[in-house]
């Protein structure tokens, strides 16, 4: 009887100790969560402040920027920068249409090609996977250079003044292929073998089994491809001459800034009264116009993006 009483007392003491330790753990976890929220909020504000500053500067009068510099709240509001950029709205809308179309087509086609390549290279029954993998990796170390690339596009492929000269070079990236290959390695090969035994072909397996499983990798690679096409201006400058009416958005904005600077400098060199061109606010306005639409692509892939960028990470 005495032993039972002692056991009950000890059990009660242990229970109280356990409850006390749980309260301490709950308090420490709550404290860590609060600190994490505060820290994340501060980092988020620091990340968003530059973009707020850009938007504010794009609506600020040029004289105010010259006198006081940039500020989060405009001292003198002006829409002159946007008026100059949208002076020819047809040209702006045409550039937007070219960029949106090129981004949509390039991302879709590039995703399909990269995912197929990654799927083939990770299959152990593909005999040339090591050779092709080495070739893809080798291109990240060495390149033929700008002149051979330009001659190949303009003389061999005859793509001068063609949108394909901008579309094709960005379709595949060695780094994105390696990223996709590493993710598809995590899918057990036994699934593919089982589907093959059941009579499914390789392309059917790829479409119905591999692609639905690879959504995180597809979202990550797709976002990188979309950003590459949206921000593309260098190949456009190389291969699209003045014969092309509607150039990609980034090149159009780049040319707009250069033309405005040329007009201002020419007026100053010719002793003509200074032309009132808001150069600084125009730069910020072009950044807003170029950045704004692509920001809305991220929420659609946010669910898979974090999982996708950790592909190949080492687990502790």
Image: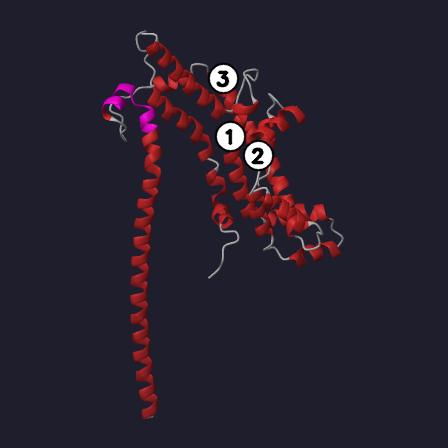
Residue most extreme to the right = 199
Residue that badge 3 annotates: 91
The Cα–Cα distance between marks 1 and 2, rounded to whole angstroms, is 9 Å
The residue mark sitting in front, 2 or 3, is 2
Looking at the rendered structure, which numbered label has been put on residue 170? Answer: 2
Q: Are marks 1 and 2 in contact (CB under 8 Å)?
A: yes
Magenta region includes residue 64: yes
Residue that badge 1 annotates: 232
Compared to residue 54, the image places residue 212 above or below, namely: below
Residues rendered magenta in the picture: 55-67
Quadrant assignment, res 135: top right
Compared to residue 88, the image places residue 239 above or below, namely: below
Dot placed on the residue nearer the N-terminal end, 3 or 1: 3
Quadrant assignment, res 23: bottom left
> Magenta-highlighted stretch: main secondary structure?
helix
Residue 208 seen in this snapshot: no
Whole-percent x and y of residue 137?
59, 46
Dot placed on the residue nearer the N-terminal end, 1 or 2: 2
């Amino acid at each position: 009887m005495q032993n039972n009483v002692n056991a009950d007392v000890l059990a009660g003491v242990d229970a109280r100790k356990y409850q006390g330790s749980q309260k301490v753990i709950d308090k420490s976890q709550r404290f860590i969560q609060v600190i994490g929220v505060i820290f994340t909020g501060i980092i988020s504000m620091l990340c968003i402040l530059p973009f707020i500053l850009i938007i504010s500067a794009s609506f600020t009068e040029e004289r105010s920027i010259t006198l006081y510099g940039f500020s989060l709240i405009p001292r003198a509001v002006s829409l002159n920068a946007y008026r100059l950029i949208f002076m020819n709205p047809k040209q702006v809308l045409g550039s937007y249409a070219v960029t949106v179309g090129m981004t949509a087509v390039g991302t879709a086609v590039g995703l399909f090609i990269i995912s197929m390549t990654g799927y083939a290279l990770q299959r152990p029954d593909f005999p040339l996977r090591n050779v092709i993998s080495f070739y893809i990796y080798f291109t990240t170390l060495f390149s033929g250079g700008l002149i051979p690339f330009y001659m190949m596009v303009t003389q061999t492929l005859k793509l001068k003044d063609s949108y394909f000269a901008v579309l094709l070079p960005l379709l595949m990236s060695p780094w994105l292929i390696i990223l996709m290959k590493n993710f598809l390695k995590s899918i057990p090969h036994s699934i593919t073998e089982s589907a093959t035994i059941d009579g499914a072909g390789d392309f059917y397996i790829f479409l119905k089994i591999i692609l639905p499983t690879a959504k995180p990798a597809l979202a990550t690679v797709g976002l990188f491809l979309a950003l590459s096409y949206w921000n593309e201006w260098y190949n456009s400058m190389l291969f699209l001459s003045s014969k092309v009416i509607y150039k990609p958005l980034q090149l159009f904005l780049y040319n707009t800034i250069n033309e405005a600077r040329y007009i201002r400098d020419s007026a100053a060199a010719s002793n003509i009264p200074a032309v009132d061109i808001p150069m600084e606010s125009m730069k910020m306005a072009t950044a807003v116009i170029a950045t704004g639409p692509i920001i809305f692509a991220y929420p659609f892939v946010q669910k898979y993006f974090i999982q996708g960028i950790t592909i190949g990470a080492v687990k502790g």
